[in-house]
Amino acid sequence: MPQTLPITLVVPNPLNDVAKIGMLLGTAETAFQVNGWDVKFDVEIKYLDRPDGAIYDQRYCIRTSQATVPVMLQAARQIVGGNGARKRYVVFLCDMIVDAPNMQTTTVTPTGANGESVTGGAVSSLSLISRKSTVGNADGRTWAHEIGHGLGLGHVADTDNFMSASRHLANGQITGFDITKEQLVTMAQHCLALVKDGV
Ligand SMILES: [Zn+2]
C-alpha cells in the first residue's frame, strides 16, 4: 500500500492555475515514485481571496530573510489553521519570494529563489512564476527539491542528484533527478512522523 503524503497548498486566488499546479505536483510525485518511493500525494487546496498583509502582500510576494525564514514559514502555518495543519505538509504558493528585514519594510528585493523550505519542518514556499531567465526554474524539479528539504534532506554535491544546490551546471544544463535510497528512507520516515505526530 502506498504511503500518503498529505499536502495543503495555500494558493492566492490570482495565482490559481490549476493545470500548472497539478502538472508541477505530478512531476514531483512521479520523481519520487520512479526512484522507488511508493508515495501518493493527498492534496487539498486552500485559496486566499486577498492578501493577509503579513506573509503575503498585495503583489502576492512571500517575504523572507535569511535569519527569519523558518520563523516566517512556521508562522505562516496559521493561515492554514487548526491542529490538522500540523499533520500536513504545507506549501505556500507565491508569485515571488522577496527579502525583507521585517514585515514593515516597504522596499523589498527579489531573492531570485524559486523556493524556500524549513529543513524537516514540512513547510515550503514556492514561486509559481520563474524569476530567472534560464529554462527549468520553478519547475517540477524545484518542487521535488523543496519537498525534499521539508522532509529532512540537505544539499548534496552530486549534480545528478535532485538535492544538488546548483540548479544549473556551468553549461546551462539542468541538474538531475537522481534520488538515493538513503534520501528516500529519510523522506519516508519524515512523512510517517508528520502523519503520526505532526510538526
Ligand atoms: Zn535547496
Image (cartoon, rainbow, N blue to C red):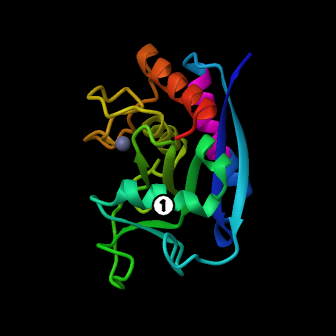
Magenta residues? 23-33
Q: Residue at x 42, y 61 (%)?
A: 72
- Say whether residue 27 is magenta: yes
Q: Is residue 175 above or below residue 139?
A: above
Q: Position of residue 33 (x, y in %)?
A: 62, 23
Q: Residue at x 51, y 38 (%)?
A: 144
Q: Secondary structure at mark 1?
A: helix
Ligand 1 is in which quadrant of the figure? top left
Q: Quadrant of the N terminus?
A: top right
> Mark 1 belongs to which amino acid?
Ala
Packing grade of label 1 (10 A; few <14, some 14-19, many >=20) is few
- Say whether residue 54 is magenta: no
Q: Nearer the viewer, residue 190 or 50?
A: 190
Q: Residue at x 44, y 23 (%)?
A: 178
Q: Nearer the viewer, residue 16 or 63?
A: 63
Q: Position of residue 9 (x, y in %)?
A: 64, 53
Q: Position of residue 156 (x, y in %)?
A: 30, 29
Query: Pointer 1: what residue?
Result: 75
Q: Quadrant of residue 110?
A: bottom left
Q: Is 33 displayed left or right of 159 in the figure?
A: right
Q: Is residue 172 above or below residue 177?
A: below
Q: Nearer the viewer, residue 94 or 54?
A: 54
Query: Is any atom of residue 128 visible in this view?
Result: no
Q: Is 191 displayed left or right of 96 in the figure?
A: right
By secondary structure, the bulk of the magenta-drawn segment is best described as helix
Query: Is any atom of residue 92 visible in this view?
Result: yes
Q: Residue at x 29, y 39 (%)?
A: 169
Identify the residue at the far bottom of this view.
106
Q: Quadrant of residue 49?
A: bottom right
